[in-house]
Image (spheres, grey):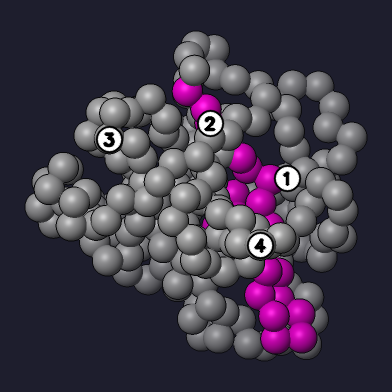
Amino acid sequence: LRVYLGRRTQQGINANEVSRNVNTIINHPSYDSNTNNNDIALLRLSAPVTFTNYIRPVVFPAGTSSWITGWGDIRLPTPGILQETMVPVVANDQCNTLLGSGSVTTNMICAGLMEGGKDTCQGDSGGPMVSKQCSAWVQSGITSWGYGCADPNAPGLDHQQRWPERAWFCHLQPYNHMPVWFYSLTCFYYYFSNYYYYYYYYYYRYYY
């Protein structure tokens, strides 16, 4: 498995891109493929990655209006250039009413427009949900699942960012004296001197 940072287009050369092999994969121990609950994993990269103008950290969460990004379906063929749009967070109880009682757990974040038109879709899973707090980009979720794509009254679901920090201390403390990078689908974690940072290169899709 190999991960890529700083990528904007799927075709041609990305001059600002770097890539790393994955040394370790840690799946969430309570992942449920039937419900998509706990749909998250951590990856330890083979080497540290240097911050640049195109590869920057995203920190832990807050905020309600969030940006979603990706190269997933908006039409055929799928877009080669990274897409993005902004969607509001929807309360989980309202989301359960819309999608079916019990389908949205406390580990999930629901986001989308009631009129539809903006959403993630097939090929976007694993991308980050982020919001801007002052000058910092803050990550609150990872794209997980949904019914259809950009349909009315069918917000998309993201996994909440709570497990990675616990997983770090449970599984990865032997590495706490060296920089370690992690990846949750397309979200990267960097640990050094007791700080966590998120990396992302994966902006979400935009419906026209």
Pointer 4 or 2: first along the chain = 4
Q: Which residue is mark 4?
A: 134
Instruction: Magenta stretch: give its range.
Output: 183-207
Circle 1 sits in a helix, a strand or a loop, which is it? strand
Observer-side mark, 4 or 2, equals 4
Q: Which residue is mark 1?
A: 4
Q: Say whether marks 4 and 2 touch (CB < 8 Å).
A: no
Pointer 1 or 2: first along the chain = 1
Q: Say whether marks 3 and 4 touch (CB < 8 Å).
A: no
Q: Residues within 10 Å of mark 3 (few under 14, many from 20)?
A: some
Pointer 3 or 1: first along the chain = 1
Q: Which residue is mark 2?
A: 205
Pointer 3 or 4: first along the chain = 3
Q: Residues within 10 Å of mark 1 (few under 14, many from 20)?
A: some
Question: Would residue 3 appear left or right of 207 to someone viewing this image?
Answer: right
Observer-side mark, 1 or 2, equals 2
Q: Amino acid at mark 2?
A: Arg
User: How far from the left and from the top, in percent, is residue 130?
Assistant: 55, 53
On the question of residue 14 being in view, the answer is yes
On the question of residue 198 being in view, the answer is no
**Which residue extends farthest front?**
134
Observer-side mark, 1 or 4, equals 4
* Residue at left offset 27%, top offset 56%: 91
Work out how far the residue at label 3 is from the one at label 1, CA to CA, in angstroms.
Answer: 34 Å
* Residue at left offset 40%, top offset 46%: 88
Work out how far the residue at label 4 is from the one at label 2, CA to CA, in angstroms.
Answer: 24 Å
